[in-house]
Image: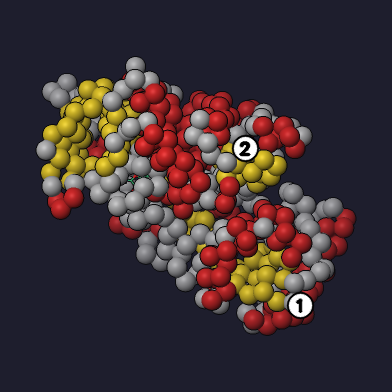
């Protein structure tokens, strides 16, 4: 079957939805293809937090921030491997993208609370209601439907179609029951198919360290299809070896722990000996490496009721909380002694660690690891202790794009008709993506792709 649209968007995650909606708004006919039976990708299962500087929430909380600081943090967090011009484009447009989500897409963000993810100088991550990407994807889907944009699930893009000049003119896809479909694109194809964290073979191809010994937090659709397709059409790839693990994941399943977002409110990390070993707001790669250097290659996250009450992650992520307790991965204890014993940690050692933490909290100075937000007093129970391992989370590498999201070839020239946005691209995050920057990247560049592809 053959169909023709102005714009064909591949992948229904944060980037794809944003691109499709903006292209349609600019007057194009648009189709959105999704290979899985359901939409959302990694965006759906993420915490959904989005960084932006000078947002309405920062203003309300009196937090001083600006685009330059956001750029600096992002570049530094990726060891200055990200493309400064592209990072600037993201930082300069993220605030407007967040406002678009709030005002046009009707995403509800917490009005007076932000996260400060590892590597950020200030609190700048907007938190959607429910603390997950479900709020984003539900509202984006609703808007897409309202705008009359056709969404084809169970439809996997296999190959980009090009004309004799190399211009991308459509997509070959496989639909339900293996049917062969052709989507012709009058104006352009936007690849928004996410990363390759769920593709172990591809991980190994680009970085042998990330073999099957790592589980993944990623959605099953994150298999790098768009990277392979774009490369076949002449796209340059970059930064492919940079694969990020998320440090605090379920040791039984590899799934990211959002209950453990209590870390951003002061939870500490200890090893089997009950000792801290890293600054808890360090970058994800640094914490992951530190965990893998501990006995057993795992860590425990510990917090108390006071910390739990700040973001209420237990209530917000109640299903996950109950599951972790049932699996014996998370334990609630009245005393530190009880918490230690559940995981066979020496109670005296854990108590000594907490006394030290309380001292540093009081002095406002973490002499051991310089916790950037300041440690919290944990003298009062009850306590929560959760076992965690790092798991593959984000692939920083991907196709090379420019400021208007055109995909570039090896010579740095745009491939006509081909655009890309989101995790499939490789130019923003460098060696390490900071928390809250995936959604900022996907939504900001997704919108730009939608707007530019129509021009
Ligand atoms: P981003 O954050 O960049 O938007 P996501 O992981 O949220 O990335 O979304 C990517 C989406 O693309 C996922 O829903 C995934 O299933 C989908 N996808 C991946 N490969 C293909 C493909 N070949 N054809 C159609 N959809 C795809």
Q: Nearer the viewer, residue 171 or 17?
A: 17
Give left or right: position of 277 versus 439: right
Marks 2 and 1, the one that precedes in the sequence = 2
At label 1, counting other C-alpha atoms closer than 10 Å, the crowd grade (few under 14, some 14-19, many 20 or more) is some
Q: Is residue 75 above or below residue 44?
A: above
Q: Quadrant of the C terminus?
A: top left
- The secondary element bearing badge 2 is classed as helix
Q: Is residue 382 above or below residue 194?
A: below
* Residue denoted by label 2: 73
Q: Is residue 331 above or below residue 301?
A: below
Q: Is residue 273 above or below residue 209?
A: below
Q: Position of residue 73 (x, y in %)?
A: 62, 37
Q: In the rendering, which numbered label is found on residue 8?
A: none
* Way the structure is coloured: secondary structure
* Residue denoted by label 1: 335
- The secondary element bearing badge 1 is classed as loop
Confirm whether residue 425 shows in the render.
no
Q: Position of residue 267 (x, y in %)?
A: 69, 61
* Residue beneath the point at 74% across and 80% down: 337
> Alpha-carbon distance for marks 2 and 1?
38 Å
Q: Quadrant of residue 290?
A: bottom right
């Amino acid at each position: 079957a053959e169909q023709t649209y102005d714009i064909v968007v591949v992948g229904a995650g944060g980037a794809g939805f944003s691109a499709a909606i903006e292209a349609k708004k600019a007057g194009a006919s648009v189709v959105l293809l999704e290979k899985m039976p359901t939409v959302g990708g990694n965006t759906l299962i993420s915490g959904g937090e989005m960084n932006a500087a000078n947002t309405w929430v920062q203003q309300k909380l009196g937090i001083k921030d600006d685009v330059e600081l956001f750029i600096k943090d992002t570049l530094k967090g990726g060891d200055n491997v990200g493309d400064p011009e592209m990072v600037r484009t993201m930082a300069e447009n993220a605030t407007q993208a967040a406002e678009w989500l709030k005002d046009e897409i009707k995403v509800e963000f917490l009005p007076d609370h932000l996260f400060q993810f590892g590597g950020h100088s200030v609190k700048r991550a907007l938190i959607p209601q429910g603390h997950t990407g479900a709020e984003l994807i539900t509202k984006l889907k609703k808007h897409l439907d309202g705008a009359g944009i056709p969404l084809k699930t169970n439809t996997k893009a296999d190959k980009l179609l090009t004309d004799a000049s190399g211009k991308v003119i459509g997509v070959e896809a496989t639909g339900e029951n293996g049917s062969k479909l052709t989507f012709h694109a009058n104006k352009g194809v936007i690849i928004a198919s996410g990363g390759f964290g769920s593709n172990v073979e591809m991980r190994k191809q680009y970085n042998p360290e990330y073999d099957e010994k790592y589980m993944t937090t990623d959605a099953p659709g994150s298999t790098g299809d768009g990277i392979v397709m774009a490369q076949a059409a002449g796209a340059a790839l970059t930064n492919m070896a940079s694969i990020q693990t998320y440090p605090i994941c379920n040791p039984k399943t590899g799934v990211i722990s959002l209950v453990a977002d209590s870390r951003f409110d002061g939870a500490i990390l200890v090893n089997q000996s009950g000792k801290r070993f890293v600054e808890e707001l360090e970058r994800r790669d640094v914490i992951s490496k530190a965990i893998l250097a501990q006995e057993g290659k795992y860590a425990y996250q510990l917090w108390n009721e006071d910390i739990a009450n700040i973001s209420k992650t237990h209530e917000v992520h109640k299903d996950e909380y109950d599951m972790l307790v049932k699996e014996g991965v998370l334990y609630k204890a009245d005393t530190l002694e009880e918490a230690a014993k559940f995981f066979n940690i020496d109670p005296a050692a854990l108590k000594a660690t907490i006394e030290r933490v309380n001292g540093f909290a009081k002095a406002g100075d973490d002499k051991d690891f310089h916790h950037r937000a300041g440690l919290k007093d944990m003298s009062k129970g009850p306590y929560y202790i959760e076992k965690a391992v790092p798991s593959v989370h984000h692939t920083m590498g991907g196709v090379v794009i420019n400021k208007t999201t055109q995909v570039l070839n090896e010579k740095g020239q745009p491939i006509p008709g081909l655009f890309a946005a989101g995790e499939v691209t490789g130019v923003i995050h460098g060696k390490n993506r900071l928390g809250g920057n995936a959604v900022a990247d996907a939504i900001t560049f997704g919108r730009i792709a939608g707007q530019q592809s129509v021009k």
